[in-house]
Image (spheres, helix red, strand yellow):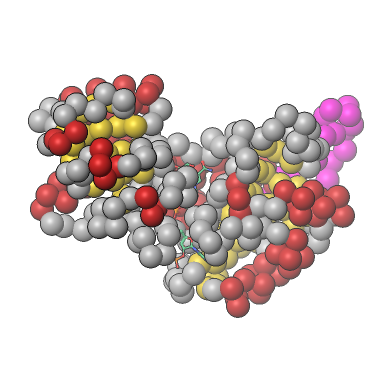
C-alpha cells in the first residue's frame, strides 16, 4: 500500500517528513514520482490527475488537500471512490482567525480609517459595541460554525444560513432560499462561508445585496465564483454596501488593473484566509486511513450528490 501527494511540493516535503515519522509503514511519494502505480491506495491532491482510474487502478481513497472541492470536477473520479476533504483543525483555526479579524475590521471601521490615514485626516466616528452589531454567516458547516463560536465570545448578535435547518446556541438559524431574505434584512456584516456548488454560484449578486440594510458590509471567504464583481462595485458605489473584505476572486490571481486592487472600500487578500496545515492534516489523513481500514465512518467525507 502506498500514498501519493500531488499538490504544493514545499508542503509535500513536510507531509513526507510527517509520514516518515508517524506512518513509516506507508510508502509516501510526491507527484510526479508515483512509485509502483498498482500499489497506490491513497491519493491526496488539490486537483486530481487526468485519467485517475487508469493511472491508479487500486485507489481506495481520494483526499482533497483543501477544505473545498470545487477546484476539480467530481465526475472525473470513479463513482465509488470516497472523496475526503480537509476539515482539519489547522484549516479551521486559520479561518476562525481570518474571519474574526475581518469582522472586527469592519465592525471598527478599519477601511474608513485606512482611507483617512492616507489623506492625513484625523476624524473620529462613533464606536458601537459588538452587542449592537448583527453578523450573519452564509454556510453553517465546519468553518461557519467555528467562526460563529469565536464571534459569540465577542458579543455580536449572530445569525446563520444553511441548506438544511440547524440549531446553534446563540445563533438565529435560517434555512433555504425562502428564508435568506429575512436573515439579510437583519444583517450588518455578512460573512460568506459557503461551498461553491451549482446552487451557490453567483449568490453574492445585486439582488442579495439589495436585501441588506443600507451601509452593510461583506466578508467574502468562500469561493471567487460566489461573487458578482460588478454587483459589489455597484453596491459600494451607491452606498448600498459600505465596505468589503474579499479573500477569494474569480479569476485568481486577480488580473492587473482590476478595480478591486485599488478600491478604497475593499480590503483584498490573495486567497490566504486559511490553509491546510501539514501537521494536523497528516494527522487527520492517517486517522481516516485507519477508519477506512476498520470500516468506520470517515471525517470530512464529501457527499457527491450534494457537491460538498
Ligand atoms: P461544509 O462543512 O461542507 O459546510 C457547508 C455549509 O454550507 C453547510 O452548512 C451547508 O448547509 C451550507 N450550504 C451548502 N449549500 C447551500 C445552499 N445551496 N444553501 C444554503 N446553504 C448551503 O463546508 P466548510 O468546511 O464549512 O467550508 C466552506 C467553504 O469554505 C469551502 O467549501 C471552501 O469553499 C471555503 N474555504 C475557503 C478558504 C479560504 O482560504 N478562503 C479556506 C477553506 C475553505 P447544510 O448544513 O444544510 O449542509
Ligand atoms: C482553501 O481555500 C481550501 O479550500 O482549503
Residue occupying image coordinates x 19% and y 43%: 57
Q: Is residue 53 magenta?
A: no
In screen coordinates, is 255 left or right of 26?
right
Q: Nearer the viewer, residue 61 or 14?
A: 61
Q: Is residue 109 magenta?
A: yes
Residue occupying image coordinates x 40% and y 27%: 8
Q: Quadrant of the N terminus?
A: top left
Q: Nearer the viewer, residue 280 or 104?
A: 280
Start and end of the magenta stretch?
107-127
- Where is 116 relative to 231, above or below? above
**Whole-percent x, y for residue 28 in the image:** 21, 28
Can residue 114 be seen from the camera position used here? Answer: no
**Whole-percent x, y for residue 273 in the image:** 54, 39
Q: Nearer the viewer, residue 288 or 97?
A: 288
The residue at the far bottom in this view is: 178
Residue occupying image coordinates x 38% and y 54%: 75
**Whole-percent x, y for residue 31 in the image:** 31, 27
Q: Quadrant of the C terminus?
A: bottom left
Amino acid at each position: 500500500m502506498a500514498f501519493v501527494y500531488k499538490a504544493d511540493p514545499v508542503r509535500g516535503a513536510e507531509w513526507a517528513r510527517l509520514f516518515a515519522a508517524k506512518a513509516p509503514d506507508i510508502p509516501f511519494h510526491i507527484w510526479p514520482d508515483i512509485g509502483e502505480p498498482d500499489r497506490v491506495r491513497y491519493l491526496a491532491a488539490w486537483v486530481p490527475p487526468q485519467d485517475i482510474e487508469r493511472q491508479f487502478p487500486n485507489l481506495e481513497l481520494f483526499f482533497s488537500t483543501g477544505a473545498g472541492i470545487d477546484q476539480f470536477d467530481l465526475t472525473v473520479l470513479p463513482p465509488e471512490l470516497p472523496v475526503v476533504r480537509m476539515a482539519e483543525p489547522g484549516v479551521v483555526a486559520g479561518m476562525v482567525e481570518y474571519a474574526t479579524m475581518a469582522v472586527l475590521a469592519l465592525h471598527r471601521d478599519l477601511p474608513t480609517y485606512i482611507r483617512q490615514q492616507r489623506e492625513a485626516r484625523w476624524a473620529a466616528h462613533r464606536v458601537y459595541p459588538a452587542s449592537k452589531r448583527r453578523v450573519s454567516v452564509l454556510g453553517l458547516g465546519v468553518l461557519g460554525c467555528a467562526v460563529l463560536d469565536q464571534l459569540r465570545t465577542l458579543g455580536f448578535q449572530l445569525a446563520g444560513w444553511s441548506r438544511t435547518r440547524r440549531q446553534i446556541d446563540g445563533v438565529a438559524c435560517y434555512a433555504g432560499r425562502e428564508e435568506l431574505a429575512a436573515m439579510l434584512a437583519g444583517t450588518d456584516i455578512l460573512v460568506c462561508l459557503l461551498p461553491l456548488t451549482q446552487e451557490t454560484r453567483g449568490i453574492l449578486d445585486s439582488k442579495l445585496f439589495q436585501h441588506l440594510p443600507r451601509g452593510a458590509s461583506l466578508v467574502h471567504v468562500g469561493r471567487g465564483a460566489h461573487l458578482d464583481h460588478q454587483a459589489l462595485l455597484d453596491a459600494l458605489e451607491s452606498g448600498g454596501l459600505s465596505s468589503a473584505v474579499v479573500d477569494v476572486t474569480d479569476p485568481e490571481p486577480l488580473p492587473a488593473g482590476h478595480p478591486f486592487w485599488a478600491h478604497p472600500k475593499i480590503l483584498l487578500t490573495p486567497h490566504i484566509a486559511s490553509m491546510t496545515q501539514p501537521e494536523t492534516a497528516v494527522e487527520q489523513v492517517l486517522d481516516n486511513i485507519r477508519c477506512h481500514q476498520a470500516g468506520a465512518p470517515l471525517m470530512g467525507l464529501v457527499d457527491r450528490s450534494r457537491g460538498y
